[in-house]
Image: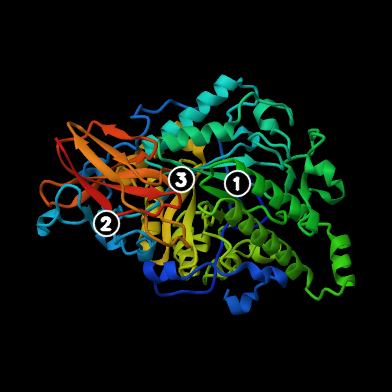
């Protein structure tokens, strides 16, 4: 998801277009219950008033390419039914992994399906606590350099639309429930904007109208399949390289005094309050106008060092800060600049769309030695990235640390880093681990078994808030490189799942009304505008338990093709809280 650029660090390679943003907080060895989690309301953003730095002592403390093959077809408004239990991976969120449940007071229930046979009072029309293990299952769809979408900058509108449909179909067929779509690769727009120019990756020329609004089209297509869309933005990159001419309304021109050429790219100076205000304005605009399920930042803050480790030239702004009475060191000041931006973006997202998540995918190592034995880039100091501060302040719903190393690489081991990150959140944010599948087949360490190991490791840390994975990048899933998409579906994602509810979600969701008929169920709700999906649970003839069968967009009134028997249907709010399920019989 970010530009893979090999950095001059012995053990740490930074993937090119795959930087995500992550957040962290103090050490938390024991699990907070989901009920406790829901009570932990997000910390007030008043911290903006003073420096938002975090003392590291007190705190304790990639990419590739390839063509799109069309997926198998499925019913357009459903996520495909689950595979046989025998086909599911033995580590796939079994009962022992289901301890990290949605907050009890947010309308969700424990991840244990109700056994209808044990309750003689269950009749058609009654309510049951049918539920399932939650998990964020996503892929990064990178637009920069046409890594995933679009595959070329010379496509017409119809071709651009077709590629979006393929992305959605493939996500659904793989069992994913979210698409992290890059809409701002270089202070531009892969959507219709009056603030920033159209992206050159759509047409070859920055500012040229492609004849389609990709973000709007994707949201419509994805929501029809009950798949979330998160707008992925790079906050400070003004231009990925300096070899092209930016449009007249590019921020590199309108705020040219803060446009810094560094390492053959243009970076908008994070020390400028005007740059920060521009970022917040862009985020507020897109979050207000589009039915987004989330806003996502990657790991590009202050730029990664060039091959000569040339200092980033921000003397003028830092000296002005010190002349004005500032007392922070340069590194502290830089972190404070980024922290203020994160806080203001968080406020903008929540004000514009309270049901949307805001998350960041940071570099996978917070600091060398954290945890013990880990070596590599010191992102805390080098790029002024302090996700633990963002988690502690309640500015993010999740962090997606880019854990782009195999479990066998001791100095940066996935299975060492993942539980460490999860232990830092203290119930204040989720961890959706970032996985690099572009490396599959490149070395002996990068096999499908390695990907399996990483997903299992994530699921093992469910009780600490590690509730999902994000795969970089979508191209490998679209091409099913070495069978990775088929493996994900077969071994892990055969049974559908909702993402976990927003960390700060509270309140209950009113159950739907459901009427059964021959092979179908018709569902309605008193507040349809507050919903995004129905979840259909089928009663197992052997155990009597209600087992998830499919997730359907709430825009669908009648769902057909259902087997005869007893079902239960729940309503899912826009923030992923789920109601109790209404029992209904299909004849």
Residue extending farthest to the front is 526
Q: Which residue is mark 3?
A: 138
Q: Which residue is mark 1?
A: 287
The residue depicted at 65 percent of the width and 22 percent of the height is 154
SS at badge 2: loop
The residue depicted at 65 percent of the width and 76 percent of the height is 55
Instruction: First in sequence, mark 2 or 1: give its number.
Output: 2
- The foreground one among 112 and 22 is 112
Where residue 562 sits, quadrant-wise, is top left
The residue depicted at 51 percent of the width and 24 percent of the height is 162
SS at badge 3: strand
The answer to whether 56 is drawn above or below residue 243 in the figure is below
Q: Is residue 96 left or right of residue 385?
A: left
Is label 3 in contact with label 1 (beta carbons under 8 Å)? no
CA distance for labels 3 and 1: 20 Å
Q: Quadrant of the C terminus?
A: top left
Binning the other alpha carbons within 10 Å of mark 2 as few (below 14), some (14 to 19) or many (20 upward) gives: some
The residue depicted at 52 percent of the width and 63 percent of the height is 411
Instruction: First in sequence, mark 2 or 3: give its number.
Output: 2
- Single out the mark in the foreground, 3 or 1: 1
Tell me the tag on residue 466. none
Q: Where does residue 415 sit, x and y in percent of width and height?
A: 43, 61
């Amino acid at each position: 998801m970010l530009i893979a650029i090999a950095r001059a660090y012995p053990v740490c390679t930074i993937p090119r277009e795959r930087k995500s943003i992550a957040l962290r907080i103090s050490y938390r060895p024991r699990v907070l219950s989901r009920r406790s989690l829901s009570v932990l309301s997000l910390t007030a953003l008043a911290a903006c008033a003073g420096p938002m730095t975090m003392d590291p002592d007190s705190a304790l403390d990639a990419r590739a390419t390839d063509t799109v093959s069309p997926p198998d077809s499925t019913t357009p408004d459903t996520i495909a039914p689950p595979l046989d239990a025998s086909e599911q991976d033995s580590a796939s969120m079994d009962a022992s992994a289901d301890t990290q449940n949605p907050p009890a007071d947010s309308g969700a229930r424990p991840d244990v399906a109700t056994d209808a046979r044990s309750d003689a009072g269950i009749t058609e029309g009654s309510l049951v606590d049918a539920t399932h293990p939650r998990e964020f299952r996503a892929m990064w769809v990178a637009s920069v350099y046409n890594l995933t979408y679009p595959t070329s900058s010379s496509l017409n509108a119809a071709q651009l639309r077709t590629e979006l449909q393929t992305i959605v179909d493939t996500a659904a067929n793989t069992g994913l429930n979210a698409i992290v779509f890059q809409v701002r690769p270089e202070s531009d727009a892969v959507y219709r904007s009056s603030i920033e120019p159209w992206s050159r990756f759509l047409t070859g020329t920055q500012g040229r109208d492609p004849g389609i609004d990709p973000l709007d089209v994707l949201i419509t297509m994805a929501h029809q399949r009950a798949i979330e869309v998160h707008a992925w933005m790079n906050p400070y990159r003004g231009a990925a390289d300096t070899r092209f001419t930016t449009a007249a309304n590019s921020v590199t021109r309108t705020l040219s005094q803060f446009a810094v050429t560094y390492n053959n790219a243009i970076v908008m100076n994070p020390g400028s309050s005007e740059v920060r205000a521009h970022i917040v304005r862009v985020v507020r605009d897109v979050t207000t106008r589009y039915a987004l399920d989330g806003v996502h930042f990657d790991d590009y803050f202050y730029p990664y060092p060039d091959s000569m480790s040339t200092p980033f030239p921000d003397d003028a702004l830092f000296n002005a800060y010190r002349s004005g009475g500032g007392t922070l060191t340069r590194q502290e000041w830089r972190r404070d600049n980024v922290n203020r931006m994160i806080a203001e973006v968080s406020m903008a997202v929540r004000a514009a769309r309270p049901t949307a998540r805001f998350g960041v995918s940071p570099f996978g190592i917070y600091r060398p030695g954290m945890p013990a034995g880990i070596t590599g880039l010191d992102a805390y100091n080098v790029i002024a990235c302090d996700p633990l501060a963002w988690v502690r302040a309640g500015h993010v719903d999740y962090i997606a640390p880019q854990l782009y190393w195999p479990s066998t690489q001791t100095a940066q081991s996935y299975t060492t880093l993942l539980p460490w990150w999860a232990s830092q959140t203290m119930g204040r944010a989720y961890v959706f681990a970032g996985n690099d599948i572009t490396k599959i087949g490149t070395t002996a360490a990068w096999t499908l078994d390695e990907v399996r190991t990483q997903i299992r490791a994530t699921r093992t840390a469910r009780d600490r808030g590690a509730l999902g994975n994000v795969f970089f990048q979508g191209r490998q899933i679209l091409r099913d490189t070495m069978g990775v998409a088929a493996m994900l579906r077969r071994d892990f994602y055969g049974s559908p799942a909702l993402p976990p509810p927003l960390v700060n979600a509270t309140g209950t969701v009113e159950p739907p009304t459901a009427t059964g008929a021959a092979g179908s169920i018709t569902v309605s709700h008193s507040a349809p505008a507050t919903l995004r999906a129905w979840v259909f649970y089928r009663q197992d003839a052997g155990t009597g338990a209600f087992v998830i069968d499919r997730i359907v967009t709430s825009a669908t009134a009648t769902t057909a093709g259902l087997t005869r028997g007893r079902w239960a249907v729940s309503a899912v709010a826009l923030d992923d809280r789920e109601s109790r399920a209404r029992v209904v019989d299909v004849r």
